[in-house]
Image (spheres, helix red, strand yellow):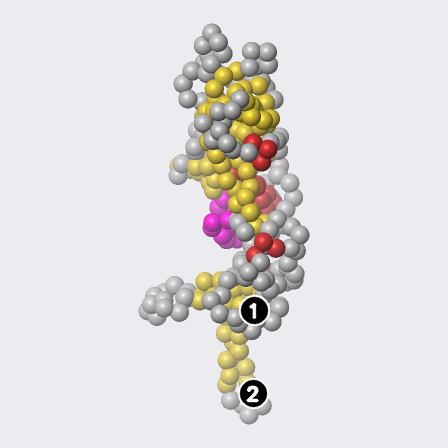
Amino acid sequence: AAAKGSSTQSGGPTLAMGCGAAVADRQGKWPTSFDFSQSYLHVDELWQLGNPVEFENCDGDIVKLGPAEQEGRLTYELNGVAKGDVTELSFDASSGRLLQQEGLPLASSMESRSVIPLKDRDRALYLLSWLAQNCKVPGLPAAEEPVSYVLLKLEKPVMCPIGSLIIGSKLDFDIHSPNCRMAFFGRILASVDPKDLKQVRMVKMKQKVGLLDRVDKQEPTLLICKDMFKADTDMSLFMGLKVVHESSGLEGILEGNFGNEGKFKVKFKEELPNLKLDAKGNVKGEERIALFFKRYDF
């Protein structure tokens, strides 16, 4: 918000809170209500308009895509090193692969599957779709400007009319600092009982890590896995969830437990590449798998 001067009938100056044209335009697109029937992704860091989108791919590479000076392009950095511009993106929802022009991976190796891990896929694709659209880079689904909601829990009850403006400031900020003390501002959309926060369906991505144990003799796409669950874990809670083979990025489905020692079965769509097996089908070395799932915050 910007301060602007106005005159009273007596001619004396006053100070009124207004806003610039850019801020007013963005406020016009803000939601006017909050839908409690929807689920919302918990994010640890807010994304600001014009900032790059950063994520870690399945190979452990840090990928950063941001606005370029020239329309129709995105800047591309890998592990902090500039790699040129991206002029087209494509995403395969079934595998999680994100590729650039000519089908090239966004990774350090040309052999990489260039997969966005499940734990970060929703956030990364949500932001990238808007960024690419805004920069006129084709290939991703159409998107609206990303919206973030904030749940504020106050120490004491405060009279806050629905629809009113709320401003958060760091009042103990050094007055000689050139930085702005205003941390955020927005409009109040709904009130929530602090004793019943479950009505806010806010989810956070979680993961469990385990190892491949052996390949089924009759069905090579079915693998027995271990070291993810305790023997007394209720496996029905995880049935049907996606499991990712970390080294290849291939996804499978958890089909159920195997025996009574915490082992379980995962069915993949295809045989896992480059697995080293002994004569009995046991997996040599440590082949990690990850199970991703959503958990409600409240």
Q: Amino acid at mark 2?
A: Thr
Query: Residue 46 location, x and y as percent?
Result: 49, 52
Dot placed on the residue nearer the N-terminal end, 1 or 2 = 2
The main secondary structure of the magenta stretch is loop
In the rendering, at what x and y percent does residue 185 appear? Answer: 52, 64
Of residues 294 and 55, the one drawn nearer to the viewer in this rendering: 294
Circle 2 packing at 10 Å, graded few (<14), some (14-19), many (20+), is: few
From the viewer's perspective, is 192 left or right of 15? right
Q: Which residue is mark 1?
A: 165
Category of crowding for the residue at label 1, using alpha-carbon neighbours closer than 10 angstroms: few (below 14), some (14–19), many (at least 20)? few
171 in relation to 115, above or below: below
Residue 248 screen position, x and y as percent: 50, 24
Residue 269 in percent (x, y) is at: 61, 22
Q: Which residues are magenta?
A: 43-53
Q: Residue at x 50, y 62 (%)?
A: 153
| Quarter occupied by residue 188 | bottom right
The residue labelled by disc 2 is 8
Q: Is there any visible trace of residue 25 in the rendered image? A: no
Say if mark 1 contacts mark 2, CB within 8 Å: no
Residue 164 in view: yes
Residue at image point 53% right, 68% down = 166
Nearer the camera: disc 1 or disc 2: 1
Q: Amino acid at mark 1?
A: Leu
